[in-house]
Image (cartoon, rainbow, N blue to C red):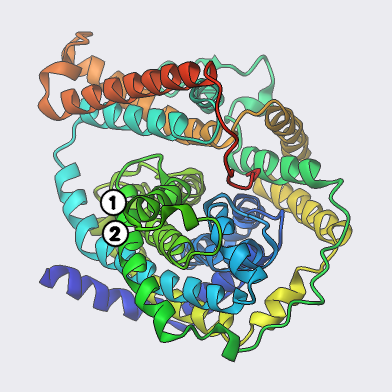
Amino acid sequence: MSSSLTGLWHGFEVALLPANLMWCFVGVLVGNIVGVLPGLGVLATVSILLPLTFGMKPVAAILMLAGIYYGAQYGGAICSILLNLPCHPPHAVTCLDGYPLTKQGKGGTALGLSIIGACIGAALGIVEMTFFAPVVARFALNFGPAEVCTLMLFGLLAGSTLARGSPLKGVAMMLLGQMLGLAGVDMNTGLPRFTFGVLDLYDGVELVALALGLFGIAEFLKSVNRLAPLHVGNLRLGLRDLLPNRADLRIGVPAMMRGSLMGALCAMVPGTGPTIASFVSYALEKKISRTPERFGTGMIEGVASPEASTHSSVQADFIPTMSMGIPGESGMALLLGALMIQGIQPGPLLISEHPDIFWGLIASFWIGNLILVILNVPMIGIWVRMLAIPYRLLYPSALFFVCIGVYSARNSLFQVGETLVFGLVGYGMIRLRFHVAPMLLGFILGPRMEENFRNAMAISGGDFSIFIRRPISAVFVSLCGVLILSQLYAQLVRHRASRRPSQVNATVPQVEE
């Protein structure tokens, strides 16, 4: 515990350096704007700004990208509560009770509770990362190639099967991402793989091109017809409107604590992320409520708990990413790729080899969340006005920065064409209801899993039983089996339920990620 506090003190020394503090502020500001604007997702924004980090120091780059990631969650609640627009998947469940509160004239109260819940949830997630991530990292130092290989397999399966949509489609996209990650010259044999005779592919597929294509170009194509501006003239909120009364706090604060705990627990399972955490916390509140039938009509718990859970999960998602190199969800996969571009290998040795990055990141969480509260409370009127920015101005400008960013990666027009191809492929996959995030997850983790698989085979002399003989590896293999069986059972239950006549229930607003 004392070592964690010492490390945190060092982290504040790093995060409070003028340059790092400036980039932290830029990250949370951009993230907050992205969260407010419908259609411009976090993944697309991080992808667009990824080339900007090439000329930055690693600490500043990670602080900025992380600020965008968790800062967007603050702005996302505004659209969900005031306009019933779940701009980001974690806030879809917030619409259920947030928008009814707005129609009752309590939209400001709902926003105030979401900000308080965000602070409580983020604080718990940061504390969890401060004291738990070093423990996880020390435990992960005992991992050999077999353990790392099976851990990554579990992370890939969890990220694919727990993603929105069909688990089978998620696995298919993950395998496609793995194949793309293996393209290039094999380091062991020196032979080209999946290059199809194209010399530009000998260095492999560019991460920036893949990310910008899947989450930049595809996002633009998906939303290109959304040209009608939102009418926000009747939404006028002041600082006084955000203050909840005592009765709302008595109901909301316990719900926030439960949601924060649920988000912190969900973050420890790779592939869950804030979206699943918010839905689970909402289901928990409905389960323990004395009046579950009133959920969906404007319940305080229906806003406070999911929002706290979202922010707790967002912060705690950095634990498996930084300490084991396993991204908790697609946003974390991009941050993992940003670290690798900077020449930094996430994993158990990150804390000891790069303490400035690890502890500086944790300290920046406290600073960034404080900045976000300062930005959101007095400037709520400005954020609401930003909803009126027309799409015809927003997306062409974003597309311009996509082209500039991908060209700067290798100063090659081939990368621009590569981005266009991935954008068209990503758009086609979205139209076919394939979730593209597992593709990025497979692209980043696939080559690392292959490397550890080869090392494990070399150690065992080609004996596959090494994955069963070693206890930790056997546990992860068992977890993979349990995950697959649970998904098969869930599909069987859904199939049986679809064959029965069912009543029409209230549904969660649909959101396209």
Q: Which residue is mark 2?
A: 261
Is 243 left or right of 257, judged from the image as shown?
Answer: right
Q: Quadrant of residue 427?
A: top right
Q: Residue at x 52, y 59 (%)?
A: 69
Residue 265 is marked as 1
Q: Amino acid at mark 2?
A: Leu
| Crowd tier of the residue under label 1, counting other residues whose Cα lies within 10 Å: few below 14, some 14–19, many 20 or above | some
Q: Residue at x 38, y 23 (%)?
A: 450
Q: Nearer the viewer, residue 389 or 153?
A: 389
- Residue 146 at what x, y percent from top left? 22, 25
Q: Secondary structure at mark 2?
A: helix
Alpha carbon of mark 2 to alpha carbon of mark 1: how far? 6 Å
Which residue occupies the extreme bottom position in the image?
A: 240
Q: Amino acid at mark 1?
A: Leu
Is 42 left or right of 389, judged from the image as shown?
Answer: left
Q: Quadrant of the C terminus?
A: top right
- Residue 64 at what x, y percent from top left? 52, 66
Q: Secondary structure at mark 1?
A: helix
Pointers 2 and 1 in contact (CB under 8 A)? yes
Q: Residue at x 59, y 76 (%)?
A: 106
Q: Residue at x 58, y 44 (%)?
A: 506
